[in-house]
Image (spheres, rainbow, N blue to C red):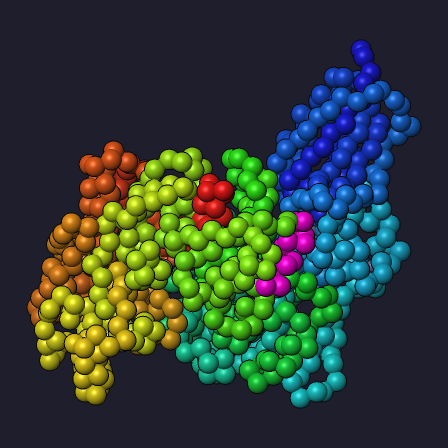
Amino acid sequence: MSHTNRSIHINGIVQGVGFRPFIYNLAIQHQLTGSVKNSASGVDIEVSGLVNDIDAFIAAIPRLAPPLSEIDEIKIIEVASHAFDSFQILQSVDKSTDFLPVSPDMSICSDCNSELFDPNNRRFRYPFINCTNCGPRFSIIKDIPYDRNSTTMAGFKMCSACSSEYTNPGDRRFHAEPIACPDCGPKVWFELTEGNDRLVEEEAIQTAREMLKEGKILAIKGLGGFHLVCDASNEHAVHELRIRKNRPAKPFALMAFDTETIKSFVHVTPPAESLLTSRQAPIVLLETKPNTEIAKNVSPGNSKLGFMLPYTPLHLLLLEPGEGFPNALVMTSGNLSEEPVIHQNQEAREKLSAIVDGFLMHNRPIHRRIDDSVFAIINNHPYPFRRARGYAPNPIRLSEPVPDILAAGSQMKNTFCLTREKYAFVSQYIGEMDNWDTYQHYQNAIDGYEHLYRISPQVIAYDMHPDYEATRYALNRAKNHGLTAIPVQHHHAHLAACLVENGIEPTQNITGLIFDGTGYGTDGTIWGGEVLIGNCKSFTRRFHLKAVPLPGGEVTVLKPARMALSTLWAYQLPWMENLPPLKALSELEVDTLRHQLVNNINVIHTSSMGRFFDAVSALIGLRMEISYEAQAAIELESLADREEWGYYPWQIDGQEINVMEILKSIIDDLHNEIRSEVISARFHNTIAHLALDLAQKVRNDTGIETVALSGGVWQNLFLLERSLYLLRENGFTPLVHQILPTNDECISFGQAVIAANQV
Ligand code: ZN
Ligand code: ZN
Ligand code: FE
C-alpha cells in the first residue's frame, strides 16, 4: 500500500458552519495526518496517508458535510510526500484578493433548542445560545475570513467554559464564532420609553410578555433588526399599531410558538410545513381558516396570513406558551413607513419611541440589517415574495465565469447584484428607493458587499428609467470611475432573470409573459403588459396591452377609481352614472379627470398589466384608493370564487392586446348583478387564457415552447396557478422564479446576466 500526500482546496459556504472540525474528525477516522485551515477563498486541507484512505476521505466530504455548508468545488492536487505528526487545525490566512461566500443567518437548531429549555444546561434560558449549526452569521460578519474578531462578537471576551468548547474539535461549538453563555455573552434588557431603570435577563423577558398580554406595543431587537410586536388577537392593539405606524391596511406578519398553533389559524400543507420549519424559517403566506382569534385588522381584505416560527432563542422565550399569553404575535418590521428596518439601539429609541410602549433590547450589535423573508407555496413548491434573512447572501451559481459587474437594480423593491467568477451575489431586499434612508442603506450595502467579496466592478448595469435613484447612482459611478455602463430595459431584465434562474442557456430564445406594474419602455412610455421574445443578449416586443392614459401618473396609481375611468375612456366606453368608480369620486375630481384626458394634460401612457388589475378592482366596486402597493389587485385576488371557470373574450390587433370586450363583459355582468366573487374569478381566468393565447401565437410563429412568467402581477397566485395549468396542458414549459421574487427584486440579477452577455 503506497503512502502519499494531497493538497485539497474546497470552496463554497465552508466557513462558520463547522467545516474544519468535520474535516478534522473525518481525517482522524481515515488515519490521515496533516492540517486544515480557513483561507479567504475557502478551506485548505493537506493530508498524508495511504492512497485508499485518502480517496475514501475525499469521497466522504460531500456526502457527510455539515448541514449549513454548501460545497461548490473540491480541487485536489498531488503534492510532494512529507510526514506530519498528527492532524491539526491551523490559524486562518488572509490573501486579500481571495473571496468566498458566507452563510446566511440560520434559525436555532434542535440541539440548541433542547438545551435552551433544559434546567441542567448551563445555557438554560439563555437568549443567545447558538452553535456551529445555527445562529447569526451574515448579519454579524464584518469581514472574511470568518472568525470571531471580524464579527460583532469581537467585543465579548469568552469565559473559560466557552473557550474550552470553542477549542475542542469534539464539541458542537468548536469554532462557533458567536459562541456565548450567560457569563460572557450578550445580555437582553427591557426599557420603558420614559427612561425608567432597565430590567435585565429573565425579568426583562417576563416584563415584555406581561405588557404584550395587556395589549401593549413593543419594539423587540431580533437577528437582522427590530420588530414591532403586539398581541395578534387584540384588535385594539393592532388598530393602535396601525395608527401609530401610519400603516392603515398593509398586512402584518405573525409569529406563533409552534406549527400546531399555526395550524389552528391557517391551512398548512406539507410543503408549507417543511418551509416553515426549515433552517431559513421564512414567513409563509397561508390560507386563513374561518373564525379564528386573529384580529380581522391584521390582514384586511386578504385571504392569507403570513406566519413564521420563532427563529432565535430570544423569540422562543418570548413566545413560550403560558397562562393568558397570546397564541400569535404581530411581528412587523421595526421601521417608519418605507424606511429600512431599524437595527441599532439608539436609532430605535429615537425613531420608535412614539410608536411603542417599551423596548426589549440586547447588546449584540447587528452589522448588516436584514428583513424577514417571505414565501408562498405554488404547486407544492416554495415561491419567493421577499428574499432576505436565511437566503441572502447566498450566491446564484452561473454556468460560466463572468466579469465583475455591479447591477444597480430597480426603484421599488430594490436589490443590487454583484458578480464575480461563477457567482452572482444578489443583495437582500433593500426596499423603496424614493426613501432617503433606504437610498443611504443601498449605498452602504453595496460598499459592504464589494468589500466582503473583494469585488471592484468594471461594468455597471442599470435600468433605462431616467428617474430611478439606482440609475442615477449607476451613471454617477460610471462617470466618476470610468466604468462601462450598460442600460437594460426593465422587462428584458425580468425575462433574463427568470431564464437564468431556471438554468436555461443564456442564448436560448424564450417567450416572456412579463405582467408587471411599471417599467420604462424603449419608446419612453410605461410598459407592463408585455410579451417579449428574447434571451440574455437581446429581445423583441411581440405583443403588449394597448396603452391607456395614466393621467397625473402617481395620483392615478394611488386611486384605482381614476384608472378605471381612464381605461374606459381609452376604449371610448361611456362613464355611466351607476358605475362604482364614478360614484367613488367627487364631481370635481371627475370633471378634472375628464379635462385632463380630453386635453391630454399631464398624461403619460401605459401598457401596464398591474394598472389593468387596478382598473378592474375599482370597476367592480372593490377598491377605489390604495394605501400600499398592489392592494387593489391583492383584494381582487382574495375575492375570486375558486369554483368559477368562465372567462371573457379579448382581441389581438397586430401587436396590441385589445381588452374592450373584457371591459364590456364586466360591465354587463355588473348590470346583471353577477356576484363580484364570480366577476373577479372570470377576470383572472381571462388573463390566464390570454396568457395561453399569446404563448400559442408566438409558438405558431417561432416554435418557442419555453415561457417565462415574470413581473409583479405573477405574485397573484390564483392567476399563476390557472396560467401554469393551461400552459402545461397545451405543451408549454412554463418557467417561474424559484430563487428571486418575481417582483422587482429580480431586476438586478436580470441586469447582471444581460450585461455579462453583452460585454
Ligand atoms: Zn445550534
Ligand atoms: Zn461563556
Ligand atoms: Fe417590474
Question: Quadrant of residue 564 in the image?
Answer: bottom left
Based on the picture, tell me whether residue 445 belongs to the magenta stretch. yes
Q: Nearer the viewer, residue 217 or 485?
A: 485
Q: Residue furthest right?
A: 85
Q: Residue at horizontal 83%, vertical 20%?
A: 80
Is residue 419 something that shows in the picture? yes
Q: Which residues are magenta?
A: 443-454
Q: Residue at horizontal 16%, vertical 76%?
A: 598
Quarter placement of the N terminus: top right
Residue 712 pos. (x, y %): 37, 58
Q: Is residue 342 above or below residue 529?
A: below
Q: Is residue 645 above or below residue 210?
A: above
Asked if residue 642 lies left or right of residue 237, the reply is left
Asked if residue 219 lies left or right of residue 179, the reply is left
Q: Nearer the viewer, residue 708 or 201?
A: 708
Determine the main secondary structure of the stretch shown in magenta.
helix
Based on the picture, tell me whether residue 681 belongs to the magenta stretch. no
Count of numbered badges drawn on the protein: 0
Residue 734 pos. (x, y %): 33, 41
Residue 145 pos. (x, y %): 75, 48
Q: Residue at horizontal 59%, vertical 66%?
A: 441
Is residue 178 something that shows in the picture? no
Q: Residue furthest top?
A: 1
Q: Is residue 6 above or below residue 171?
A: above
Q: Residue at horizontal 34%, vertical 48%?
A: 709
Asked if residue 173 lies left or right of residue 437, the reply is right
Residue 620 pos. (x, y %): 19, 70
Question: Quadrant of residue 347 in the image?
Answer: bottom right
Q: Nearer the viewer, residue 471 or 163?
A: 471
Q: Is residue 224 above or below residue 458?
A: below
